[in-house]
Image (cartoon, rainbow, N blue to C red):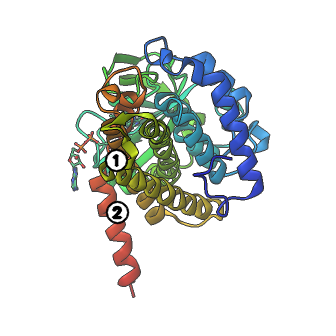
Amino acid sequence: MTAHLSNVLWTDEELSFREEVRDFCQKEIAPVADEIDHGPYPRDLLRKIAEAGYMGVLHEKEVGGSKRGNSFEIIVAEEISAVNGGLDMARMSSTTLYGMPVSKFGTEEQKEKYLKPIITGEKIGCIGITEPNVGSDAARMETRAEKDGDEWVINGEKRYITNGSQADYMCCFAITDPSVNSRQGMSAFIVDTETDGFSVVKDHDLMGMKSARVSHLKLEDVRVKPGMLLGEPGQGFAILMDELDSERTAIAGEAIGYGRTPYEICVKYADERIQFHRKIREFEGVSFKIADMAMKLEAGRALTLTAARMLDKGMKATKQASIAKLYTTEAAIEITNDALQILGGAGYTTDYPIERFLRDARLMTIGGGTVEILRYLIQREVYKEFLPRK
Ligand SMILES: Cc1cc2nc3c(=O)[nH]c(=O)nc-3n(C[C@H](O)[C@H](O)[C@H](O)COP(=O)(O)OP(=O)(O)OC[C@H]3O[C@@H](n4cnc5c(N)ncnc54)[C@H](O)[C@@H]3O)c2cc1C
């Protein structure tokens, strides 16, 4: 076990699972970690991840999962992200962001048909919330689904959708009753991306996360059978809110991974690089950065595990998941940036993967809820605790 991983917080089962996932990542992903940022979408690698069981840790055994829970999901998220961030973003979008709404609100038939193949890696999922005119203010979504006989007809655009152009299924949020507040008028659908009227406008050219694909999608008169509605009509907003707590906890796990590898590289580098006849780690300007990185990684893991444990106990974890995501994503940017600084010119080259981790980490104070929105949510939860409604 690596020295920096505090053992007291984790069970023996979790610790040995981490070792297992780490070995898998070293064997299967590390040798191609740079290459997949320049190549085709890594579908085969996602299938290998699925075969190893890492798509299914949150899911029921009936659909091929292991139902180990969120504390295991954050381990998978950290370990894969410590090797390649975009790959885990693709995995998580499929199995968690798409998969959890289907798992929690889908019928047995929907789970059999639309979730099982995600967990085996045969199919890829994505989640469609964001639109050209709607980001943080998701409640003002413009995509509409109208009833036509038994079927629903969906029209709208979804932007920045991870896996969008590669996905077989999308969990698509749309307004079904514009006459009421979207908290009551939004619904969630499973959309088969082979359906007529579904198209990919383009894949976005991203700063980082190059091994994933993030797309602009269009839905023009996409007809959806009644059996594709998730939950009840009007339950969409509740499904969305439920999904976000597990998404944010898992992203916090990923963020620790983005920081961890640059940290490990710079700790070693600072012990080997000599300037002014001394190892550079002997300069406080360097060693204090390393101390701060160690602190942020430990604190981030503890916060993330707290949110995961709460979710595993069935508790509401909006505040803890938001705190974990906010803290770890800001820390990941600071850690990757400081690690790059410690390597000097070498850090700015692609001889080391730190620049890749910095570019990947930069996304996560935006995706899945910006840090501004998370601060808003956290203070709102604080005031709910301090000023409970009578
Ligand atoms: C690479 C990538 C992958 C993504 N994957 C997905 C996906 O799979 N599915 C999906 O649905 N979406 C996805 N997104 C979208 C992502 O969730 C949104 O980008 C994010 O929610 C912010 O929305 P926005 O970009 O429209 O920014 P906006 O909401 O327009 O915000 C712009 C700025 O204004 C600030 N702001 C907005 N409102 C407030 C406020 N009330 N108080 C303070 N500041 C505020 C924001 O914090 C931000 O700094 C992805 C985005 C990216 C870049």
Crowd rating for badge 2 (residues with CA inside 10 Å; few <14, some 14–19, many 20+) = some
Residue at which label 2 appears: 377
| Residue 241 located left or right of residue 138 | right
Quadrant of the drawing holding the C terminus: bottom left
Given contact means CB atoms under 8 Å apart, are the residues at marks 1 and 2 in contact? no
Q: Which residue is mark 1?
A: 286
Question: Looking at the picture, does residue 3 appear above or below residue 155?
Answer: below
How many numbered discs?
2
Residue 110, picture quadrant: top right
> How far apart are the two marked residues, 1 and 2, measured between alpha carbons?
35 Å
Percent position of residue 51, x then y: 73, 27
- Taking the view exactly as shown, the residue that stands out farthest to the front is 277
Q: Identify the amino acid type marked 2.
A: Leu
**Who comes first in sequence, dot 1 or dot 2?**
1
Q: The residue under label 1 is which amino acid type?
A: Val
Can I make out residue 131 in this image?
A: yes
Indicate yes or no: mark 1 CB to ligand 1 under 8 Å.
no
In the displayed structure, 37 sits above or below 107; it is above
In terms of depth relative to the viewer, which is nearer, 299 or 265?
Answer: 265
Q: Quadrant of residue 60?
A: top right
**Residue at image point 44% right, 43% down:** 259
Q: Residue at x 71, y 50 (%)?
A: 15
- Along the viewing direction, whichever of 387 and 290 lies nearer the viewer: 290
Residue 99 is situated, as x and y percent measured from the top left of the image, at 59, 39
Above or below 314: residue 142: above
Q: What secondary structure is found at the residue carrying circle 2?
A: helix
Most foreground residue, 319 or 7: 7
In the image: residue 37, left or right of residue 155: right
Q: Position of residue 66 (x, y in %)?
A: 76, 43
